[in-house]
Image (cartoon, helix red, strand yellow):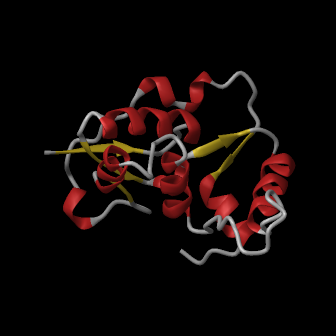
Amino acid sequence: MVTIINGDGMIIGRLASLVAQRGLAGEEIAIVNVEKAVISGSRARVLANYRHKRERGASGNRWGPFVPRRPDHLMKRTIRGMLPYKRPRGVEAMKNIKCYVGVPVEFVGKEMEVPEEAHMNRLNNPNHVTLAAVSTFLGAKF
């Protein structure tokens, strides 16, 4: 049984940590509407941070690390950072987690979970940027 989580209005970091914990527990999870998830902070700071990572300036190495552009890949990368992805249990957890832009046909009309601990109404500051805006800024065509 796959648990479907709606990413609309969710804080990306809180959602990623929640999904990582449940993935390590062996749960199969599908996150839909990933492009509507939010990153807290001012638009200028968030976009500058992601541009710096994308230009591979964070490590000073021209060969990596690679930071994706598409919102579903960005979400998956964020979740990966919260897992022991080089160990067998982390690899298995990553296989159980799927991220989708929009709602795929197989999930239309099914019940979706909306975790309250990751919702953006918990933000103290109204500044936030959607994952779609970050991806468009980085040059994604989704």
Answer with left or right where residue 73 lies relative to residue 129.
left
Residue at (32%, 47%) from the top-left corner? 93
Res. 7 image quadrant? top left
Answer with left or right where residue 103 lies relative to residue 64.
left
Q: Position of residue 82 (x, y in %)?
A: 51, 40
User: Which residue occupies the extreme front position in the image?
Assistant: 87
Q: Quadrant of the N terminus?
A: top left
Q: Position of residue 127 (x, y in %)?
A: 76, 37
The correct choice, above or below, for 54 with respect to 46 in the image is: below
- Judging depth in this view, the residue of 51 and 129 nearest the camera is 51
- Judging depth in this view, the residue of 15 and 9 nearest the camera is 15
Q: Position of residue 73 (x, y in %)?
A: 51, 63
- Judging depth in this view, the residue of 13 and 81 nearest the camera is 81
**Number of marks present in the image shown:** 0
The correct choice, above or below, for 14 with respect to 30 in the image is: above
Q: Position of residue 87 (x, y in %)?
A: 39, 48
Answer with left or right where residue 110 lies relative to residue 75.
left
Answer with left or right where residue 65 lies relative to residue 59.
left
Residue at (22%, 42%) from the top-left corner? 111
Res. 122 image quadrant? top right
Residue at (28%, 41%) from the top-left corner? 112
Residue at (61%, 67%) from the top-left corner? 68
User: Which residue occupies the extreme left position in the image?
Assistant: 1
